[in-house]
Image (cartoon, rainbow, N blue to C red):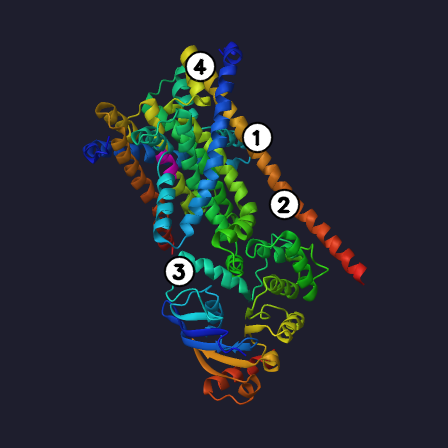
């Protein structure tokens, strides 16, 4: 029933697509997180226009299917004279989509930092951005890294939709192999397993990282206590 | 003494229908130590926070050394907000809840704003920080993390952090209220040193003993208004207004309860 | 070229027809997925079987770890290999149900964890068990605490239905493609479609608060 030969013959093609999926998602994350930060800070601003624009962007991209965002980017960019290859359009669309979710994660992280932290930074003369960079954002890191990772996993999965605008990523490769072999079962199981493996690998690394952070806190607590005790003894 | 060191002119601030400041004006001379007392919600914290524009007043003006802080309207232009940051660096603010920065160790808490705001080099910022941490008695804690400090140590760190900016005015918002009684003394000791060094200070507090010993002037606020002001010893022993009298009475009853 | 809004306006009646199908598919898929997930949740708690739990864990991990688009292709292209020719509409509903019920199962797990253990014990001591216990006592509490994530999941389902256009289900996205492939004005037509999707999802996601309040009042 299974045709094992397909696994051997078409694996290189699928792996090429898989590699493009990884590259596209990495680029989209690299663009999306800074954009998400800008949107999160924009949403907090007192200027009505800036906060309205940021909020609208976030809500529009969170409340529409990714596939229509992809098609809009695909048709709107050339409409206004910006001709890009499908890969670049895909990266931009995925980054825009991701940034709306990244923004909400970062905003929640900022809100979780006690208000006095921002006040003390502003009271000592820091600008809003200096206070964010030096005082607030570093404190949000442990809060936002797990949800940002989860959202990045979502981007891997959503990137499959870029096959609809002929980006030769993993799903597109799968569709092409299917077109040549007419063996959908073998092909889509392989495609699914590749996505699954990537997803599980990152999720596992993340879990390990979280455990380490928790553990490190405890060990560093012991170390700090130890050095403090030693110091106080040497003073006496 | 320069009577125009700090001038507050007709400050107004309301939150919804609660009036926190109602036409408050005040002149402070250089080196003057002013204590502000009053029931909770009387606007004394808002007054301090209006001085460095952390809570922009709805109306009124703040002048420091002949220069206007913030703006005459509650919205700032870009230039005004840039100037405001320079003013804030000169006005050290100390909070009831310390607000030390938990992700930075003790030394870095004092170094960071010097580098970011005052643009000092790390070397000079660190040497300044070490000197000030020594003055506030935290020289043996420089590598520690704030979470392992006691409340009194945290507050001394917060004071050191603002002193490193070479402030010409200190705004202290109930600096000892969040501390266990046995830790109040160590913070007051640091504040006394500042008084002796001639620092101009506005202090919101409930420590009446401290106020009458070190204050040049005592202000009593209620309902967003300045009700009474004068020499602390005089005012506390012989209040002129009914409101201050009943406030002091309540305070004493409360202190008997403890 | 200039953006010509008349193409958007002309498309709206047909787009609304498409939106109606989108809503039908979304609601049907979501109801089926909630039913499936509820069955799974009850079975998991009552059976307490290791084999069942590991199959369930595998299912959830697979669904969460792979793109829904690939899951739709799997159902649409693979089931016919086994002689099960469902047609695009049914295949789409099956795929969405299988996908969403994994997420709803996770949501219900969280909701169930917030029902105090005493509720089970008290019911047992009163002689309430089985169907009545779940139907009258445990599930209502589970669902009410799960309203916000369930509403969120419903918007996810609505957004996922747009992918069914790729297996030729004629819903909003497909209608929009049909229109612009005839009039060659994709930007105008897609913009209108975008706005319709936004309005549907935005209203649904905002209904969470409203629903919660309604149900709380009803309980009290």
How packed mark 3 is, by other alpha carbons closer than 10 Å (few <14, some 14-19, many 20 or more), is some
Percent x, y for residue C180?
25, 26
Q: Which mark is residue B5?
A: none
- The disc numbered 4 marks a residue on which chain? A
The C terminus of chain B - image quarter = bottom right
Distance from Cα at disc 3 to Cα at disc 4: 62 Å
Distance from Cα at disc 2 to Cα at disc 3: 43 Å
Q: Which mark is residue A201?
A: 1
Tell me which residue sits at (66%, 45%) in the image.
Answer: A216
Tell me which residue sits at (49%, 80%) in the image.
Answer: B220
- Which residues are drawn in magenta? C154-159
Q: Quick one: label 2 or label 1, which is nearer the N terminus?
A: 1
Secondary structure at badge 4 equals helix
Secondary structure at badge 1 equals helix
Secondary structure at badge 3 equals loop
Q: Which mark is residue B76?
A: 3
Location of residue C86 (image quadrant): top left
Circle 2 sits on which residue? A214
Secondary structure at badge 2 equals helix
Percent x, y for residue A171?
44, 22
Asked whether C131 falls inside the magenta stretch, the response is: no
Circle 4 sits on which residue? A177
């Amino acid at each position: 029933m299974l045709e094992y030969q397909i696994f051997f013959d078409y694996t290189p093609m699928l792996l090429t697509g898989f590699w493009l999926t990884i590259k596209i998602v990495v680029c989209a994350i690299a663009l999306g997180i800074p954009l998400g930060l800008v949107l999160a800070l924009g949403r907090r601003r007192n200027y009505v226009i800036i906060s309205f624009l940021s909020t609208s962007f976030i809500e529009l991209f969170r409340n529409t299917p990714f596939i229509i965002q992809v098609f809009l980017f695909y048709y709107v960019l050339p409409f206004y004279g910006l001709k890009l290859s499908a890969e670049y359009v895909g990266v931009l669309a995925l980054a825009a989509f991701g940034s709306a979710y990244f923004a909400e994660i970062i905003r929640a992280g900022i809100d979780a930092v006690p208000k006095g932290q921002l006040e003390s930074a502003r009271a000592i003369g820091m600008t809003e951005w200096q206070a964010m960079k030096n005082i607030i954002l570093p404190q949000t890191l442990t809060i936002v890294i797990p949800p940002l990772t989860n959202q990045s996993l979502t981007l891997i999965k959503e990137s499959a939709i870029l096959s609809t605008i002929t980006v030769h990523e993993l799903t597109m490769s799968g569709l092409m192999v299917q077109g040549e072999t007419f063996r959908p079962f073998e092909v889509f199981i392989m495609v699914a397993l590749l996505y699954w493996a990537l997803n599980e690998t990152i999720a596992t690394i993340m879990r390990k990282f979280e455990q380490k952070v928790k553990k490190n806190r405890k060990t560093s607590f012991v170390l700090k206590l130890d050095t403090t005790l030693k110091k106080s003894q040497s003073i006496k | 003494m320069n009577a125009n060191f700090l001038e507050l002119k007709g400050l107004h601030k309301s939150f919804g229908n609660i009036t926190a400041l109602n036409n408050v004006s005040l002149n402070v001379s250089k080196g003057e130590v002013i204590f502000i007392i009053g029931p909770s919600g009387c606007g004394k914290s808002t007054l301090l926070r209006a001085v460095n524009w952390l809570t922009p007043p709805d109306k009124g003006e703040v002048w420091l050394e002949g220069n206007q802080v913030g703006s005459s309207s509650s919205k700032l232009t870009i230039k005004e907000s840039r100037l405001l940051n320079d003013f804030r660096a000169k006005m050290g603010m100390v909070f009831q809840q310390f607000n030390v920065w938990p992700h930075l160790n003790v030394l870095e808490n004092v170094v960071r704003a010097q580098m970011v705001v005052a643009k000092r080099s790390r070397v000079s910022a660190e040497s300044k920080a070490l000197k000030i941490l020594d003055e506030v008695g935290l020289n043996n804690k420089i590598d520690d993390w704030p979470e392992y400090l006691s409340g009194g140590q945290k507050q001394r760190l917060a004071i050191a952090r603002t002193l490193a900016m070479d402030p010409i005015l200190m705004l202290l918002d109930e600096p000892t209220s969040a501390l266990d009684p046995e830790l109040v003394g160590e913070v007051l000791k640091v504040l006394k040193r500042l008084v002796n060094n001639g620092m101009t200070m506005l202090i919101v507090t409930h420590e009446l003993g401290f106020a009458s010993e070190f204050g040049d002037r005592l202000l009593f606020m209620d309902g967003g208004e300045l009700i009474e002001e004068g020499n602390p010893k005089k005012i506390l022993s012989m209040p002129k207004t009914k409101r201050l009298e009943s406030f002091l009475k309540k305070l004493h009853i409360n202190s008997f309860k403890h | 070229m200039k953006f010509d809004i008349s193409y958007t306006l002309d498309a709206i009646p047909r787009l609304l027809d498409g939106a109606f199908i989108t809503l039908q598919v979304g609601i049907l898929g979501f109801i089926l997925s909630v039913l499936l997930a509820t069955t799974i949740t009850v079975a998991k708690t009552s059976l307490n079987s290791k084999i069942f739990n590991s199959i369930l864990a595998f299912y959830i991990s697979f669904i969460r770890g792979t793109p829904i688009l690939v899951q739709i292709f799997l159902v649409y292209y693979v089931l016919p290999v086994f002689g099960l020719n469902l047609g695009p509409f049914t295949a789409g509903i099956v795929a969405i149900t299988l996908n969403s019920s994994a997420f709803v199962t996770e949501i219900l797990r969280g909701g169930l964890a917030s029902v105090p253990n005493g509720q089970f014990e008290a019911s047992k001591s009163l002689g309430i068990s089985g169907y009545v216990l779940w139907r009258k006592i445990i599930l209502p509490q589970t669902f009410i605490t799960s309203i916000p994530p369930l509403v969120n999941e419903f918007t996810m389902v609505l957004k996922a239905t747009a992918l069914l256009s790729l297996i030729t289900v004629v819903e909003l996205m497909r209608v929009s493609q049909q229109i612009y492939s005839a009039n060659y004005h994709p930007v105008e037509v897609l913009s209108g479609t975008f706005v319709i999707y936004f309005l549907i999802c935005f209203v649904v996601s905002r209904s969470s608060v409203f629903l919660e309040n309604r149900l709380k009042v009803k309980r009290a």
